[in-house]
Image (tube, helix red, strand yellow):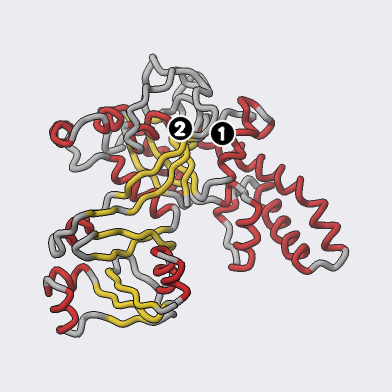
Amino acid sequence: MEAGIVGLPNVGKSTLFNALTASKAAQSANYPFCTIEPNEGIVSVPDGRLDRISKYFNPQKIIPAALKLVDIAGIVKGASEGEGLGNKFLSHIREVDAILQVVRCFEDPDVTHVAGGVNPLSDMEVIETELMLADMQSIENSRNKAERAARAGDKEAKERLAVMEKCTASLDQLIPLRKLKWEDSEQKILASFGLMTAKPVLYIANVDENDLGGNGPLVQKVKEFATANGAGVVPVCAKLESEIAELDEGDRLEMLQSVGLEEPALAYLARAAYQTLGLQSYFTAGPKEVRAWTIPIGATGPQAAGVIHSDFERGFIRAEVYTLQDLETYKTEAAIRQAGKLRVEGKAYVMKDGDICHFLFNV
């Protein structure tokens, strides 16, 4: 799964993307549409549980979970009608699973704002409106074909048409599709449309170095908007984070301490993006490696095993599961087993975030 970084031009998207992916490429020039084709990068998801588990195994490698990020060019008012190469850029958003919207919450006379002034609420509404207009157009383009098939008695077409009508009714009232309740059968159809306002959103408030905690009035407006729309907010100073990302480990810790941070804000952002995508981690542990594996929330034992190898899912017999708390209490897997804390779970088991597992399979 992947998340797309979007926003108006010059809000700090590419700066943030470069910092997240530890890119040392030259910073983009200060003008709109400097990102044309989307850049892609893989971001590690910091997880303190990996180090806690590793204390008991002394592994050769520690492998964190990761997620894919896509830096999509700036969207402007009128993008749904082709402004600013809008149709091309919107097509990139359709392909991602979640949207990370960067919102400018800092004043800087040297950084041009496409609308002439800093107004995060206006910026957020521009993006939301353009995505809704584009979704309306997508539905309209598909409606005739679905109507013809439905009139011919195609049951699947009738179901698709019913979902289209529900989407249209919502969008006509300027309500993004992610705010509606969907049945499981509707969800599957909705996902096939690739509609952008159905995707989960995380707002990234790009703040000034004097407001790293995101307590200023501009960020408060973003938080109010996000709360009303069931979304999260992470304040990040993209400029500072890009500088921190360029440093070696020692200098990085010193700089973090100097600004009062325990870890880069990007660590919080990566975890928040992971959650926005509906993902969680389970762990495998041994002397060769301690590793976090990424699964959707609600995945079963066999589905989790299949992330390691398809044979594990196909020949799944059972999972042996214990918790980090068990490990910290009993110190070794042998002691956990002896204490009767090693659980044996079957095919119907729904994985919990943080499970430490061994899978038994036979093919």
Query: In the current view of this chain or complex, which residue is farthest to the top?
Result: 110
Residue beneath the point at 47% across and 52% down? 1
Q: Quadrant of residue 80?
A: top right
**Residue count near mark 2 (Cα–Cα under 10 Å), binned few <14, some 14–19, many ≥20:** many
Of 253 and 311, the residue lying toward us: 311
On the image, the x and y values in percent for residue 180 come to 58, 58
Which label belongs to residue 126?
1
* Residue type highlighted by circle 1: Val
Residue 56 versus residue 136 in the image, above or below: below
Residue beneath the point at 45% across and 38% down? 40
The alpha-carbon separation of the residues under discs 1 and 2 comes to 10 Å
Of 313 and 37, the residue lying toward us: 313
Of 162 and 213, the residue lying toward us: 162
Quadrant placement of the C terminus: bottom left
Query: In the current view of this chain or complex, which residue is farthest to the right?
Result: 152
On the image, the x and y values in percent for residue 266 come to 31, 40
Q: Earlier in the sequence, mark 1 or mark 2?
A: 2
**Residue count near mark 1 (Cα–Cα under 10 Å), binned few <14, some 14–19, many ≥20:** some
Query: In the current view of this chain or complex, which residue is farthest to the front?
Result: 363
Residue 121 versus residue 109 in the image, above or below: below
On the image, the x and y values in percent for residue 56 come to 13, 64
Q: In the rendered view, does 35 fall on the left or right side of 139?
A: left
Asked whether the residues under the numbered discs 1 and 2 touch, taking CB atoms below 8 Å apart as contact, a structural biologist would say: no
Which label belongs to residue 120?
2
Does dot 2 land on a helix, a strand or a loop?
A: helix
